[in-house]
């Protein structure tokens, strides 16, 4: 069984399922919930009560950025109106029998499958997995390079396909024109030009060797390189900042990370052993030859840009 599949299984356990709009409506007003409708009613939508507790739970499930924007009564009223609108749309969707829509039925089946799998796998891991300090130390020493941080530089660049154009842009930069604005207008790297050519912090090996040699040799903030030729084009590099290499030690935060890695590996072992047992109880047939002609499909979305980088604006 592949490691990626095991990680996927573990991710299914860890990730919450957000199903706000697919929740069943709460009990409508009636003799059995008179206290709720009379004493704690924040709003009512076609007989369905929205209590202050409902509102609180809704706010708790909002992304943290949205929660931080709820600072006064006006912003709270806006959230309440959004909640009312959500319930109105859901009620109308049910009225139009979207709960019987085949796409909805299929997606609900996928959600059901995921929930069943999550609960089952959680039960497989219900027993506490002991991890000794000796195991942590041994694992850290064997994987220390994964925790060390190499030297990184933060640079911006302008890329052109024509050397003559690059020379013209370099002359404009030396005359005082904005590097950022020239990158936005002229760089052919669509993954970075819209943000002024900012590549974020990069490590050696993320960019072509010629680019790395020039970028890591620069020292002064704002320093501009000569034109650097790579297989991607002609680059003008601007140096922004540097983070020196860092050798990790077994600090508490690192120890916690190591324990999680060890636990995950032990969980992988549990899954591997259990599925090996299941293969003796269930008939499994695979036809791996069919994969010879399989072509991995391109993603349907994503950002443009021809150059793979570490991206990221200012993460240290």
Image: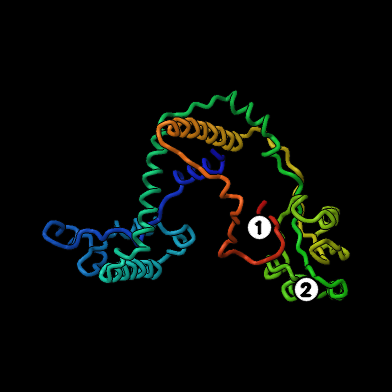
Of helix, strand and loop, which one carries label 2?
Answer: loop
Estimate the x, y position of residue 160 in percent, counting from the top left: 80, 70
| Alpha carbon separation for disc pair 1 and 2 | 21 Å
Q: Residue at x 38, y 35 (%)?
A: 123
Numbered mark located on residue 78 in the image: none
Q: Nearer the viewer, residue 18 or 67?
A: 18
Give left or right: position of 182 versus 39: right
**Furthest residue toward left:** 31
Question: Residue 33, how many percent across, how many down?
Answer: 16, 57
Q: Could you tell me residue 298's position as x and y percent?
A: 60, 61
- Horizontally, is 89 left or right of 72 in the view? left
- State how many labels appear: 2
**Nearer to us in this view, 106 or 304:** 106
Q: On screen, 295 above or below 190?
A: above
Q: Earlier in the sequence, mark 1 or mark 2?
A: 2
Disc 1 is placed on an element classified as loop
CB atoms at circles 1 and 2 under 8 Å apart? no
Residue 312 is marked as 1
How crowded is the residue under tag 1: few (<14 C-alpha within 10 Å), some, or many (20+)? few
Disc number for residue 178: 2
Q: In the image shown, does 256 or 192 lie closer to the viewer? A: 192
Query: Badge 2: how crowded within 10 Å, few (<14), some, or many (20+)?
Result: few
Residue positioned 35% across, 50% down in the render: 112
Q: Nearer the viewer, mark 1 or mark 2?
A: 1
Indicate left or right for 108 with 219 as reference: left
Residue 105 quadrant: bottom left
Q: Which residue is at a point 29% across and 64% down the rendered structure image?
A: 100
Snapshot colouring? rainbow
| In the rendered image, the vertical position of residue 177 relative to residue 268, given as above or below | below
- x and y percent of residue 177 in the render? 81, 75
């Amino acid at each position: 069984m592949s490691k990626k599949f095991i990680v996927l299984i573990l991710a299914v356990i860890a990730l919450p399922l957000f199903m706000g709009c697919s929740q069943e409506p709460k009990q409508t007003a009636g003799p059995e919930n008179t206290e709720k409708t009379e004493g704690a009613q924040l709003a009512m939508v076609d007989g369905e009560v929205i209590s202050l507790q409902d509102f609180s739970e809704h706010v708790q499930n909002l992304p943290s950025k949205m929660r931080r924007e709820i600072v006064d009564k006006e912003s709270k009223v806006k959230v309440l109106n959004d909640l009312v609108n959500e319930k109105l749309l859901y009620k109308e969707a049910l009225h139009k029998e979207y709960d019987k829509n085949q796409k909805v039925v299929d997606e609900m089946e996928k959600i059901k499958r995921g929930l069943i799998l999550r609960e089952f796998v959680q039960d497989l891991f219900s027993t506490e997995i002991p991890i000794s300090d000796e195991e942590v130390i041994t694992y850290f020493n064997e994987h220390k390079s994964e925790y060390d941080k190499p030297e990184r530089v933060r640079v911006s660049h302008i890329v052109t396909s024509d050397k003559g154009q690059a020379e013209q842009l370099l002359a404009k930069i030396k005359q005082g024109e904005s590097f950022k604005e020239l990158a936005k207008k002229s760089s052919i790297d669509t993954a970075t030009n819209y943000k002024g050519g900012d590549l974020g912090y990069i490590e050696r090996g993320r960019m072509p060797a010629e680019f790395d040699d020039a970028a890591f040799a620069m020292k002064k903030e704002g320093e501009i390189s000569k034109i650097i030729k790579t297989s991607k084009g002609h680059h003008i590099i601007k140096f922004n900042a540097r983070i020196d290499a860092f050798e990790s030690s077994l600090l508490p935060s690192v120890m916690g990370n190591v324990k999680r890695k060890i636990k995950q590996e032990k969980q992988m072992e549990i899954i591997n052993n259990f599925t090996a047992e299941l293969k003796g109880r269930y008939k499994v047939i695979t036809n791996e030859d069919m994969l010879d002609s399989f072509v991995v499909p391109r993603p349907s979305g994503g950002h443009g840009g021809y150059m793979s980088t570490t991206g990221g604006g200012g993460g240290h």
